[in-house]
Structure formats: structure tokens, C-alpha cells
Image (spheres, helix red, strand yellow):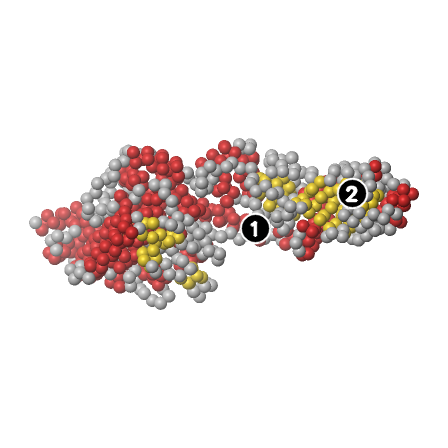
Amino acid sequence: MIQLTKLNRLIDEGFSVLFADDLKRPIGSWKALQEKAYTKDQLEQAYTNPKNALAGIITGYNNLEVIDIDLKVFSSLQEQNEFWNEYLQFLKDNIDDFDKKFVIYKTKNKGYHILYRCQKLAGNCKIAKVKDHKEAVIESRGIGGYVVVYENNISKLTYTDIQEISEEDRDILWSVSKTYNYIEETKPLEPKSEVLNEVTPWEAYNAKHSIFDVIGLDFKIVADLKDKYIIKRYGGDSPHSGYVYKDKNCMYLFSTATIYPHEKLISPFSAYTFKEHNGDFKASASKLYHDGYGTRRKSEIIERSKEIVADYHPLVYNTDDLIFPIDIFPLPLQAYMNECSKTLDASIDYMGCSMLWLSSVIIGNSIQVEVKSGWLENVTLWMAIVGKAGLGKTPSINNIIFPLLKANSKEIKDYIKKSDKFNEYNELSKDEKKQHEKVGKPSKTQFIANDITLEALVDLHQESKNAVGVFKDELAGWLKDMNKYRAGSDLEFWLSTWSGKSVSLNRMSRAGSFVENPLIPVLGGIQPSIFNTFYTDENKENGFMDRMLLSYPDLVIESYNDKEIDYRMIKWYSDSVLSFYESIKANVVKYSDDGEIVPNVAKFSDEAKNEWKRIFNDITTIQNDDNENEYMKSMLPKQKSYIPRFALLIDVMDKFFSDDVVDSSMIISQHSVLKAERLSKYFIATAKKIKSNSTKVNEYKSIIGLNKGKNKKQQFLELYKANPEVDIKEVALLLNVSVQSIYNYLKQVK
């Protein structure tokens, strides 16, 4: 026990001393000592008690207060030292002349006492508790308490030097200590979602925003600790207003001088609500939902689907394979496309193909279809929308893909914004960075590109792993690079991506890049005259053209249409697509520990499997048929890959719009396989049509070339002699004359 002479000095300094046993239990009644200290004679008499093991000093007496730091809550010496060193430095950084004002002793049980006197006192309080620990790491000993007196002094001052500090310094001491308190409350002030698996507006807002996005103009960071940032209100008198937990992205305030609640977890959404909506959570959630945050509630989509379908009767098409089978889509989507066709003169064929591309981008690598053991197909599609200028290729496409383009634009804007913040942070000095919220390098989340250079695509795909969709108004730039096959060419890269094989890119102008599971659906328009230049034997031979899915309907330019589409239908469609996208992203996409997509695997039902066997054998029969055009046979093996892909896309869309579950146990129905078969027949028939047209046009060009020295009328007459069934419109286009001119030439012949 401490020497009597040292205890006498404490009496001289005006403090009250007590004695305790080895368990720190006061000996005798010590309540009187809280009011009146021992005299030296009384102290000497009490000192001789054999039960005494420890001497203590009563807190609250003579304005004494102690901060008790108990480090045994930490499991390792390293953790203990890290905490104490950080805490002590934090105090020294914020209290002027700290070493001259506070007495510090090291305890025997892995802790410290910080002693001082102040007019402002409290009782015994638990100030800070560390995450995952029940015991407090920082407590106070004040009115009604005491602390043991120790020998191990680590400060410049001793017990006899304990002096009175200002209330301001005490407030800073307590404020710093409170910043180490971990709030066990796991949920911030937020509404509750009553819908299972729904991404609420507040969840979406919290996922996309840092708390500093909301409070950045109200608070500044004054310290960056291991697990939290210490913040202070601009213009505030207190040295600290609260803190922000790094793991929770939430603010906790002990200051009452703000618009935000104190001693509550405040998420980005909660802060936004108090800042912009005066604490009205309902109004806040409604506004964010209106702005596109959260899952578009499937119940709303389904109910709206019913309204649309109630007034819609599917069109009855003939069985000609050249008519796009729009009934492969759920009824609400059919209704939307038919409404666009009636009011905006949009092409059913172009919209249907665009819908398939949109679905393939959304689903991406998240789901594959198992055709049989060892044979998996992804959902990659290459789609060429073929049509003459002025026939509305791009407007028809945009009627379908505009919601996805909007979502993609938002991702680009978010990336630019985060990049600007990162660049600004990088330009700060080392000292400035310590006082600033750490800003990490953002990842690109853009998932649609119109730049189809391999470098750009690989860069995007390395960060947007589920899919990168390519959409080009004109595909000519993409196709021209496929004219020749050479080792390391663009064609080699694209053929690999179509099959889902990993690709690497090593060029002298850049470092090597690698994509484990490429999935790059392509969609774009092209004019038939340009497309014919790529429909060559060479491109046919290397297999590139066999992978292209072509849409080439017979269209005419329509007169002005007074019919108007209902904006509610456009809104419903946009919400549906965004909900489809968010649902797949949130509920279906899965990642491995190394950050790669782990595809869910869909399988055929028994009935679907039987239909698939029949379809496979039917295609094989055609491949072996001597009467089938040999040129067209080479595309049939690719349809054996495309049909399972179509079935998967169709089945996922059906499930989503029927409020069914899209998950890892998905079974593809017989109905979906039969629809996929009809869709495949459409693309085969269209390919034959384009090949026939290409052959015809090449014949026309050959005859015109042989007569290039003659005038246009004579060139036409030579064509007519060779083929009286000549296509008037194609010839007019090749000769660059009007159709009426061709009719005038014909009159002269007759």
C-alpha cells in the first residue's frame, strides 16, 4: 500500500482519503468521508487497520473528478496501446497545454486515471463503450465515487499537483471521450419496409450516398480515427458535435444545436429527411421514390399490367415466318409495343429485337441455361436492325431501350461526380488529407457503350462484370473490322465473346487486360445497301455473319399520325424496365470472393427438354438435307445455341411480369422453348430474305458495271433484258434515280 507520508500530502492538498481491501471494497463506512476528510491523526489511526490493502481518494470531494480508462476490454496488448496512444494524442491536440493541466497515473489493471478538479462535476458515468464489448472503456468517477491511489505516474504532474481546470477544458475532455462510444443501436431513424425483398427508397438512397453528401455543408471533419470521423458543426462553440461511423455510414450527434436529432443514429436518408423535409419521413420517401430511388413496386407494375391488358387483344398473325412473333412477350409488353406502332409508327420487328437485346443486357452473366451436362449458354445476342434511311430504325429502338439508357446515363454522371471528388482529394497535401474524409477511387458502373473499340469495352467490362451492352445507331463501323480474319484481330475477340470464352487484350499501346466472363450484347441499325457489302463469302466462312440476328421488315414511310400514346403507358413501361433491371441487379446477380460473377443455372423442365430434343433434331435434319441451300446451312448450328438463349430470355421476362420468382432454381418452361423456336424461325427466314436480296443486288450491280459507259436508261434496259422481274425500287436506288423514272423507262420498252 502507498506510504502514509504520501497520503498525508493528499490531506494537505485538501483531498479526502479512504482505505479498501484487495477487491477495492471500502473498509468501514466511508459516506462521512465524502463530506469531511480524515484529520492526519485519524488517517494514521485508520492506516494501521490490518484489513487495509489499498488507499483511495474520494472523487467529488474538493471538486475532484477522474476519467477512468479500462483497457482490459481489449484482447491484445497492441489494441490496448493503439487505443490509449490515439486517445491521449486526441486530447493533446484539442486541449491547450494538456500536459500542464492533467495528472495521469497508470493503474495495475491495464488502465489509466486522468485526474483534475473542476467546478462542473458529474456522478459516476459510463462514457464510452467499444464495439463488440459489454464493459465500458471510459468511465468517470465523480460525486459519490473514489479511485485507488497508484504509484506509477506517467505525467509531469503528481497527485499533489492536481489543479482546477476550466469548464471549457472539461467539456472538451468529455467530448473527446464520448467520441469513442460505439452505439449498439443497429437501425437508424428510418421507416420500415413491409414488402419482402423490396429495395425501399431510403435503402437505395443510403446505398448511393455518403452521409457527407448530405451534411457536408453543415459539419467539417476534425479528426479521422480508426473506426469513425469526428465532426464539428460550422460556427459551433463546442470542439466536437459528434461523429460518423465508417462501417455504418451514419452520424451520431451529442450536440443539440443542429436540425438533426441528437443521440440517435442518422443515416444519409434520415439526414436528408430532416434537412429537406423537416423530419417528415413519408414526404421524404415519396419524393425519393418519385425521383427513381428504390424498386418500382412490383404490385404497382402488375396492377398497371392488368389495366393495359384489359383493353388489349393480341393481334392474330399469320404463320409466315417473316412476321415477328410479338406474342413471345408478356401481354403488357405486347400492348406497349402495339401502342407505339399505332401512335408513333414504330416497327414491331425493330421493337421486338430491341426488347430481346435489352433483356440480355439486364440479365447478363447472372443466369445461364444448362442445355445438357457440360453445355451452358449465356444470353449474348448480336442484333442488326436493317432498314433504309428514313424508316425510323432509331426511334423504334429508342421506344424500347430508353429507360435503360437513362439508368446508364445516371451511372456515368455518378462516376464523373465521384471522380471529381477523388481528384480533388488526391490533390490535397498529406496533412490536409488527415482532416478530410477519405475518398477512394471510384469504379466505372457504366453498362452501355457506343464506343466499340476493344480497349474501351474491356476497360468497362472489368468493372461492370454482369454485362456491357453495345448500342450503335449505325453498325457499319463495327462490321468493317470483320472483313478479314487474322490472328489477334477484332474478329477473333468478338467470336470469343459470343461464346462466353475469356478474352485478354494485349496491345503495344496499353497494358494487358483480361475479362473472365465476357458478355457483350450488340444492337444497332444499318442500311441494306451498306449491309450487303459485309454479307460476303469471307464473313460467311469465318462464322461471323452466322451469329448475326437480322431484322429486315418491309416498311414504308407513313403519313403524319394524329394518334397520341398515353403518357401513363410510357411511365408504366419505364418503371417496369427499371424495376426489371434493379430486381436482377439486387436479387439475382451473385459474386464470388474474388469479385467475379457466379451465374445462376436455369434448367429445362422435362416437357421443355423433350421439345428441345425435337427442335435440335429438326434442325439437324435440315442440315443434312441436300435440298437446303448450302450457303444458309452454316447458320443453323448457331441457332442451336440461340434457341436456348431465347428460351431463357423469354422465360425470365414471363416470370417477372407474372410476379413469379427469378432465382437460382429457375426452370424453363415448355412454353418458352416453343416461343424460342418460333423466334429462331423468324431470324432464319429474315437471313434468307437478306441473302436473296443481297444476291439479287449483286447481280444488278454486275450488269450495271458491265454497262457503266451507258446512260442510266440504257443501263436499266440491259437489266430488264436480263431479268424482266427486276425489282424497281432496288434498281432506282442503284441507279440513283426516282422510281417514277424507272416507270418511264418501262413505258418506252412496252
Amino acid at pointer 2: Tyr
Q: Residue furthest left?
A: 750
Q: Quadrant of residue 703?
A: bottom left
Q: Is residue 646 left or right of residue 271?
A: left
Count of marks, rendered view: 2
Which one is in front, 733 or 364? Answer: 364
Which one is in front, 218 or 377? Answer: 377
Residue 177 screen position, x and y as percent: 69, 44
Amino acid at pointer 1: Val
Q: Is residue 285 left or right of residue 653?
A: right
Q: Residue furthest front?
A: 50
The numbered disc on residue 645 is: none
**Tag 2 secondary structure:** strand
Residue 89 screen position, x and y as percent: 71, 51
Q: Residue at x 79, y 41 (%)?
A: 59
- Which residue does the numbered mark 2 point to in the structure image? 146
Q: Is residue 225 left or right of residue 494?
A: right
Residue 594 appearing in the image = yes
Residue 94 screen position, x and y as percent: 71, 46
Q: Residue at x 68, y 47 (%)?
A: 137
Q: Residue at x 24, y 61 (%)?
A: 634
- Which residue does the numbered mark 1 point to in the structure image? 439
